[in-house]
Image: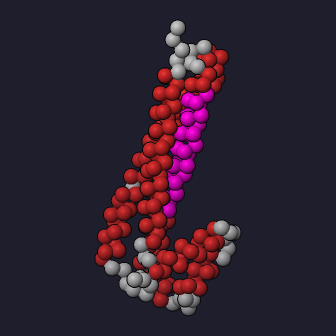
Amino acid sequence: MTDEGQPIKPEHVFLKIIWRSTLGLGESMEQATTWSMTGLAAITGLLISNLDSVGHLVSRQGLRWGLILFTGSIVIGAVSKQIGMAIGKGLVMLEKIENILSSEQGQALMANMTTTPTQLVEKMAEPYFWPLSTMMRKSGMKGLSDYLFSDKRFVNLFCVQMLLVNLHGLLAAVGLVVVASSIITK
């Protein structure tokens, strides 16, 4: 069933409240990732800058795999942070647009439009380069038929962020175990 041309239902509002409350956790995950990435970068820098000294204490293979795991963890953490920032800024933008459109001026603006919603979506996507123009067009068209599409997309991104945060932590932990278990004891 399509939402196009229908008023927003109480169920829509309820789901938005629940989903947006959950999305607020993304900021905490993003901050925690910043701290863990900083610690990993410090450990990685310390290991690399003291490679000669560390090379006598830790096996070459263990050091190599530890650095690879730390680097992978840092990269995954950076992607997770970018997703978290996109969610945060996207929600702010979404709420601003909703506030404008639900105001008297926004309602008057919508009532006076002479362009069809489909044409408006096409015009909105027009100035963007490909692939952004295609993404904008598809998102706009889905948003016409599903009023909760933007919120659902943010929830999907949040799920990806959560998976990446867990992978980031797992790689860091495995890297620490690999380095620690590779300590040479004579």
Residue drawn at 46 percent across, 39 percent down? 169
Q: Residue furthest top?
A: 186
Residue 42 visible to the viewer: no
Figure check: 94 above or below 73:
below
Residue 87 placement (x, y as % from top left): 48, 58
Residue drawn at 45 percent across, 71 percent down? 149
Residue drawn at 34 percent across, 66 percent down? 17
Figure check: 9 above or below 65:
below
Q: Main secondary structure of the magenta part?
A: helix
Which region is colored magenta? 64-92
Colour scheme in use: secondary structure
**Total number of numbered labels?**
0
- Residue 105 among those drawn in magenta: no
On screen, residue 129 versus residue 85, left or right, reads right
Residue 48 placement (x, y as % from top left): 63, 25
Q: Quadrant of residue 75?
A: top right
Residue drawn at 63 percent across, 68 percent down? 132
Q: Nearer the viewer, residue 9 or 52?
A: 52
Residue 116 placement (x, y as % from top left): 55, 89
Q: Nearer the viewer, residue 62 or 153?
A: 62
**In which quadrant is the N terminus drawn?**
bottom left
Figure check: 147 above or below 27:
below
Residue 95 placement (x, y as % from top left): 44, 67
Q: Quadrant of residue 6?
A: bottom left
Residue 110 visible to the viewer: yes
